[in-house]
Image (tube, grey):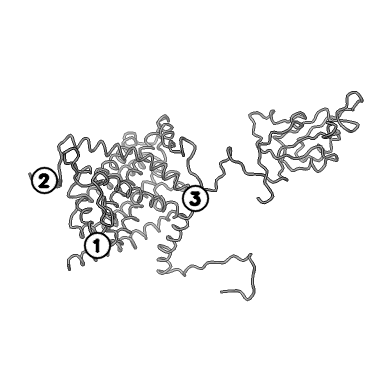
Amino acid sequence: MTPPYDPGPDVIEVMRVPAPGPAAGAYRAFGATLKGLRTTFARIFEGPVTIQYPEEKTPVYPRFRGRHKLHRFEDTGLEKCVGCSLCAAACPADCIRVVAAENTPEHRISAGERYAAVYEINLSRCIFCGYCEVACPFDAITMGHDYELADYTRSDLIFTKEMLLAEPIERTPLRTEDE
Amino acid sequence: MIPVLADIYYYEPWWIQIIKSLVIFAVIFAILPVLIVYERKLLGRMQARYGPNRVGPYGLAQPLAEIVKFAVKEPFRPTTSVGYLFRIAPVIAIVCAVTALSLIPFGPVENIFGTPVGLYGIDVSIGPLFVFALSGISFYGIMLGGWASGSKYSFLGAMRSAAQLISYEVSQSLALIGVVITAQTLSLTGIVRAQQGMWFFIPQCVGFLVFMIASFAETNRAPFDLVEADSELVGGYFTEYGGTPFVAYLFAEYASMVVVSGIATAVFLGGWLLPFGIHPPGWVDPFVVLAKILLVFSFFIWIRATLPRFRYDQLMSFGWKILLPLATLNALVTAVIVASK
């Protein structure tokens, strides 16, 4: 039965089975079984869809929100973070701790007036919402692509500024345009 | 000599008998773990996944790892269980399954180094009857195991297996009667020889169908695995078993699948015969039989991957209302055709 207009690709075709009775019973016992056997047999030639995880990883999208990264200016090498604590204020999980300190001419760490003397993210509490990234006025903190964050102790999951600034080991493949 | 129990068609000296039984036993027991891993791999492929592939090359060493795991487990039993029955039940199951292996004909009588040897455990004049008798006894293994566990899940599983085995054994034996009438013999090698012209699964297609369906029920395989329905009965009759007794049950199940595949091969699929008049040398015969057994075994797995489990009332009504009349009709029609020739 075709509808009077073209419904487009959203409409799913419903398959009707025979009404209950001996004929339907015979159909289910043989016709439907054979159909099912064909379905399972066809899977053999399609091959598995399993991704062999530790060896083989699902590529992530560029906007994937993984572990955070802190950034430096590429030309001067100064930290972008000025210790304003806006990320800590925006954080709904309250997992960022920033302690700011003054820059001095002989001891200049960031480009601004102040810098983050302590910058810690407790990744065991982080919900990876990305609000810190949005809140940051200097793009000093961004979300990276690393999602392999398991560790043996909770204290190991508190990432310090040095760890966040360090060039991350790229363990996660990135999805290309056409994927 | 007047035979006391049954005629034995060809009787070798005792030492050949011992070597033969050792070879059959060794080959089948070496094949069983391979079959288990084969089932899991094939089942995986049918569900678009790999199956075990971590232990050894292609996961082939998986059963070895599992046997070690089971063997070092602590043997325990529930306080409510009946001690000696709880221990003896898996033994009954595995002994019956292994004994039935001796019936599978792997080839005719061959000359090996000038000594005539029958490539089968034993060739008796009551072949299928012997198999059914053993499958009837092996049911005690399940029944006693389930009852002696002293757990309600085990007990329910055992009860289900009792009802299921009684219902389906009738159809299974009736399905073979058509073949026995056509071949005019109860010897399994005789039945294979009677298939020289045409394998019995063509003229006896209804019987073959009924036999296969009843065999699924008989070996407690999907879609008739209500006996061990994990979603409702935890593990069925072997819920309380762990360690090696559990492996014994597992091996008994797979051995009985091999037996049923072997019987189906001998009775319906022409045993060691090859189609299109190909006559290979005698040493090929056992491999032909093994290949056919593997084929039937793969069919078991294929069905397991496809069909969901029956409901209990469906199981009963299917067995008694469809399978039994079909098997009876098949036997009757065959009898009429054979008599009118």
Judging from the image, what secondary structure is the residue with disc 3 in?
A: loop
Quadrant location of residue B208? bottom left
Kind of residue indicated by mark 3:
Gln
Badge 1 marks a residue whose secondary structure is: helix
Measuring from the top left, give residue A140's x and y in whole percent: 81, 37
| Three-letter amino acid code of the residue under disc 2 | Pro
In three-dimensional space, the C-alpha distance between marks 1 and 2, rounded to whole angstroms, equals 29 Å
Give the distance between the C-alpha atoms of the residues marked 2 and 3, in whole angstroms.
Answer: 53 Å
- Dot 1 or dot 3: first in sequence order is 3
Rounded to the nearest angstrom, the CA distance separating label 1 from label 3 is 38 Å
Q: Quadrant of residue A96?
A: top right
Q: Which residue is mark 2?
A: B3
**Position in image of residue A44 (x %, y %):** 47, 51
* B306 vs B114: above or below: below
Chain letter behind tag 3: B
Q: Chain of mark 2?
A: B
Residue beneath disc 1: B331
What amino acid is at disc 1? Ala
The quarter in which the N terminus of chain B is drawn is top left
Q: Residues at badges 2 and 3 in contact (C-beta under 8 Å)?
A: no
Frontmost residue, B121 versus B311: B121
Labelled pair 1, 3 in contact (Cβ < 8 Å): no
- Closer to the camera: disc 1 or disc 3? 3
